[in-house]
Image (cartoon, rainbow, N blue to C red):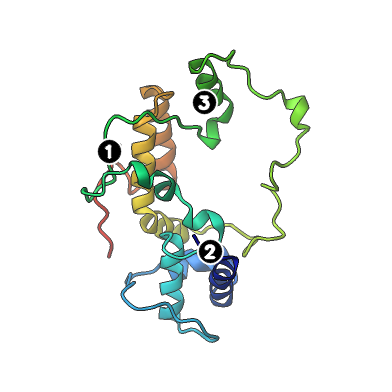
Amino acid sequence: EFSKNTLHCGALMLGSCYKTFDDLTAVGLLPPRDLSNRLPIRKDLTPDECGHWAWSAVEGAIPASYHNHFNYEWYLRPLLDAGHARPQLDGDKEIFVVRAEHLDDDWSKIDKMVGGTGETVPSDLTDGSAIFGSTSDKHLLATNTTLSETGALNLCRALCREIQVYKMLLFRAANLDMADFNQSMTELREYCPEEPDDSPRRCEYY
């Protein structure tokens, strides 16, 4: 959907505004959230213009990396009912979810559901190697990803709609039971304490 040049432009603009990921979240995601104007592309952006870029990138409106735009909602969009303010699946679609925090367990359950043995990939076959360069930081915009308390809180607020899609996915996952769902909700609240509800909610931005 986006060209490599567009992707590169988003990374350059954010890189010129913020030296660390915590700068982006703690400073760039401060209120107010104003996405009404066009994104400026030039050197020496003002703090407000940098904030516009930060909000747009975190919400997936513009690309700064492949993952920030191609998020949960992007992949799920063909199955979402667009007539609701809260994310809602259209019809009785069956969804399988593999949580990164519980990769082996989730993959094993899905494998059994589709007729497999439930065995996961043996650790001796992976040899501890990175898959698709997942641990490589040489192409990352910011290699220091440490977050302050303010940065984490701002990020949770900015990712509100994405979090509601995440809740819906977990609840509708055919391979997860209520214990799995409740476990993930507990883990979510540890990172984002302003998300007390298990069900998707309307996001009120400041």
Q: Which tag, 1 or 3, sits closer to the chain's start?
A: 1
Q: Amino acid at mark 2?
A: Asp
Element on which disc 1 rests: loop
Left or right position of 59 against 117: left
Residue 43, given in percent of the width and then of the height, sits at: 55, 86
Q: Amino acid at mark 3?
A: Asp
Please state which of residues 53 and 69 is positioned toward the viewer in this rendering.
69
In which image quadrant can residue 59 be found?
A: bottom left
Q: Which mark is residue 22?
A: 2
Residue 25, given in percent of the width and then of the height, sits at: 47, 64
Residue 69, given in percent of the width and then of the height, sits at: 47, 57
Label 1, label 3: how many angstroms apart (C-alpha)?
24 Å
The label nearer to you, 3 versus 2, is: 3
Left or right position of 178 against 144: left
Q: Is residue 46 above or below residue 163?
A: below
Q: Which tag, 2 or 1, sits closer to the chain's start?
A: 2
Please state which of residues 152 and 87 is positioned toward the viewer in this rendering.
87
- The residue drawn where x is 66% and y is 47% is 134
Residue 86, given in percent of the width and then of the height, sits at: 25, 47
Residue topped by disc 1:
90
Label 3, label 2: how many angstroms apart (C-alpha)?
31 Å
Q: Dot 3 surroundings within 10 Å: few (below 14), some, or many (20 or more)? A: many
The C terminus: image quadrant? bottom left
Q: Is residue 189 above or below residue 45?
A: above
Element on which disc 2 rests: helix
Residue topped by disc 3:
106
In which image quadrant can residue 167 be found?
A: top left
Left or right position of 109 against 36: right
Q: Amino acid at mark 1?
A: Asp
